[in-house]
Amino acid sequence: MRKEVVLEQSNVTQTILNTINYIFETLLSSIDNRLYGILDDLTFVSSDILHDNYFSKIFGTSTSNGILLIANSLLLAILLYFAIKYFISHITYMESEKPFSFIFKLIIYGLCMNFSYFLLEQILNINSYITLAIRDLGNQLFGKSICFSELISIINNSVSIDNSSLNIFSLDGLLKTTMSISLLGLVFSYSLRYILIKIFILIAPFAILSKASSSLSWFFKAWSRNLFSLLFIQIIVSFVLLILFSMKYDSANLFTKFIYIGGIYALLQVNSFVRDFVGGVSTNISQGVNNFMSFKR
């Protein structure tokens, strides 16, 4: 009788373990099959981000529509403000910027503002070319595509896990779960980065126009540093992937598995590294707002 009770308890425990493993098998399999191709598209941004039909209409296809129309209206408002300020300065004997200098700056930055779509397209292309050059180097050296889709294939082989035989309570199972959840965190982080890049592109005309006024030039400095730091992230990501692909791994070697954990952690920390190195906005929303506003001070 006692043996039957023990056997029944053992069966219940095994059933619970099998259920837990099945849940994680289904979850991790879904993550592996769907997310990594998306992660490549989110991380490696090119000028294609500008060519969305609705996005280009929001930005403005000419000076008479979209964001460009609002920016050109502000240009006229700034010109009117300067004229009034210059007139008042003659009455109050306050020092004011020379009209020639102001008009010259307004014309230069006004032209740059109206050609900002083209300028941004070239900046995105240059950044994309640098990224592709790094990834192509890895492709030539290792004969593999340097991307997240290929990385997850190597990770699965290295950790030696088949989702159909996943045991969440084993070391390999814990490592696999940790890496998959971390990569899921990367998707959220780089999704936010993708949206932030689009936002900074949309406010580009206002940022460029702000250079025309010395009292507003802080906005251009904040905008440029934040945008370039967000774009620079994918260059650092390319180097991290290059290093991960350059190493030889053995599925029986525990060192291999923890190196991959370190690589995933490095990818998660790329934004923090770039922010500390060149400044810019964080993909953590609360930190990002504070960092952006700190440039005014």
Image: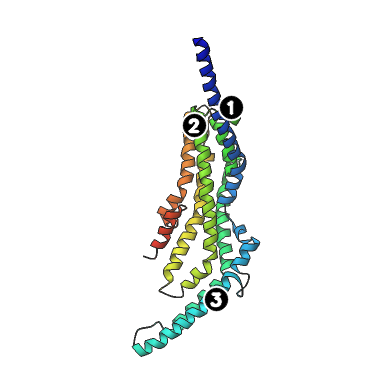
Q: CA distance from mark 3 to mark 1?
A: 62 Å
Towards the viewer: 261 or 253:
261
Label 3 neighbour load within 10 Å: few <14, some 14-19, many 20+: many
Q: Position of residue 43 (x, y in %)?
A: 55, 50
Which quadrant would residue 70 be assigned to in this image? Answer: bottom right
The numbered mark at residue 165 is 1
Q: Percent x, y for residue 114?
A: 57, 72
Which quadrant holds residue 62?
bottom right
Q: In terms of depth relative to the viewer, which is nearer, 248 or 158?
A: 158
Residue furthest to the right in view is 53
Query: Contact, CB < 8 Å: mark 3 with mark 1?
Result: no
The residue to which callout 2 is attached is: 174
- Pointer 3 or 1: first along the chain: 3
Using the rendered image of the protein, determine whether residue 136 is visible from the camera's viewpoint: no
Give residue 72's mark: 3
- Above/below status of 234 relative to 4: below
Q: Residue furthest front?
A: 1
**Could you tell me the amino acid type at mark 3?**
Asn
Q: Horizontal and vertical percent for residue 237?
A: 51, 48
Residue at figure coordinates x 54%, y 56% from the top left: 195
* Mark 3 or 2, nearer chain start: 3
